[in-house]
Image (spheres, rainbow, N blue to C red):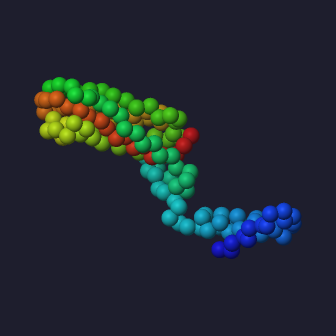
Amino acid sequence: MARVPLPERGQPLDVSYIYSLAQAINDVAVAVNSDTNNYSTIFSAGMGNQNVKTGDARFVATTQQVVSGENVIAGNTKDLSFTFSSDFKYIPVVTVSPVNVGKNDAGSNVTVSLKEVTTSRVDYTVRYNTTGTISLSVNIIAIGIPN
């Protein structure tokens, strides 16, 4: 790819220099857009396979605290939700993973189940499988097509 020479201070910007700038920008655009690795395939119910430029996909990732230093009882559940900052065009692909912040046995023995995913939020349930004191967060990742 050609490099555009930097102008000297006080140098007038003539047509040939502006042409060189435009040509360099076009070369960069061709190089970026020609790579097939710049595409992602997203499949979700209601939309089928969507091949989009990765830059046109929307990724939302967050950590949400569930409990902090609380006593929980085996078999109890807690319903939670997370609202995306803006809607997706279709229902996104969402994963919710527990993070044992307290690094104890009770925090290692939980189950997270997705209840519902919409274009604007995810509802999920955390089930405690062991009685004890727990500090737990969840990582939420949503990937989809922006609205």
**Residue at 84% over, 70% down:** 16
Q: Is residue 7 left or right of residue 89?
A: right
Q: Residue at x 44, y 50 (%)?
A: 43
Q: Is residue 139 above or below residue 31?
A: above
Image location (x, y in percent) of residue 13:
85, 64
Residue at the image position 23 percent from the left and 39 percent from the top: 100
| Looking at the image, residue 123 lies above or below residue 12 | above
Number of disc labels: 0
The residue closer to the viewer here, 55 or 93, is 55
Q: Which of the pair 41/132 is nearer the observer? A: 132
Occupied quadrant, residue 79: top left
Tell me the quadrant of the picture where the C terminus can be found: top right
Q: Is residue 5 in view from this perspective?
A: yes
Q: Position of residue 60 (x, y in %)?
A: 45, 42
Extreme-bottom residue of the structure: 2
Horizontal side, residue 43 vs residue 114: left or right: right
**Image-quadrant location for residue 93:** top left
Residue 74 point in image, percent of width and height: 14, 29
Query: On the picture, is 146 further left or further right than 20?
Result: left
Residue in the picture at 84% in, 62% down? 10
Q: Quadrant of the N terminus?
A: bottom right
**Viewer can see residue 45:** no
Q: Position of residue 138 (x, y in %)?
A: 31, 38
